[in-house]
Amino acid sequence: MGGMIGLTMAIRHPQLVERLVLLCPTISGRLSLFVNLFIGPIVLLERIPFADRLTSLIERHLLPITDRLMRPASYADRTGIPDTIHERLKADVRRPGQGLIRAECYQAMRANDLRGRLRQVRVPTLCIWGMEDNTVPLRDASVVADELPDADLRIIPNAGHWPQFETPELTQRYIRAFLSTPIKLLTVQF
């Protein structure tokens, strides 16, 4: 949700945003078919308080199934994510109350479509996408390319929805270069 929130801030309150770094941002609200078919129903069930608690109880006994759903939605086929990071992310997803948060985020992503509004973003923007993102498909990267033609759009191979975990060195290098460039150099018009 960070990318959608950052873009919305840049559109509604441009004076508060100097530059943007976006990681696989939801632009159109159209999530992948995989997420809509397999993750969406579970997430929507988690909106109901009783069902959220029931899902949490059952999930502990079905961890292998949850893991089989989480991996293709989040990571590239040949991901380089270390097991320690994957275990930390799984534990974070299973914290109490996360089901309701996931459900609200899922609904917010699907309910908001920024297409046609990105041209209002007037700040330097770096947009990084995992080539194998199975949560927010690359078709949204095409919208960024069309509507933010000056954005620095980077597509990272062997990365899914979380390139910062799967390819941390490359992702950090792109971000460091972008953030360390003086803003006046990023805003120069040629």
Image (cartoon, rainbow, N blue to C red):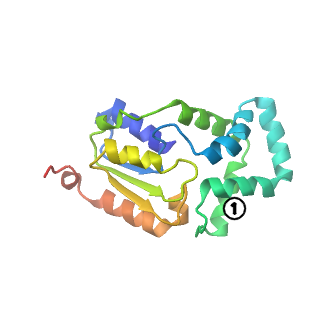
Q: What residue sits 27% from the left and 40% below the top?
A: 122
Residue drawn at x 63%, y 64% is: 85
Left or right relative to 20: residue 41 = right
Give the image quarter of residue 181.
Answer: bottom left
Q: Name which quarter of the figure residue 98 lies in.
A: top right
Pick the residue in front: 70 or 19: 70
In the image, residue 121 above or below residue 169: above
Secondary structure, mark 1, is helix
Above or below, 26 relative to 159: above
Position of 182 with respect to 42 (left or right) is: left
132 relative to 93, above or below: below
Q: Residues within 10 Å of mark 1 (few under 14, many from 20)?
A: few
- Return the x and y of residue 131 as percentages of the image width and height: 49, 59
Kind of residue sitting beneath label 1: Glu
Asked whether 143 or 128 is in front, the reply is 143
Q: Position of residue 150 (x, y in %)?
A: 26, 49
Residue topped by disc 1: 87
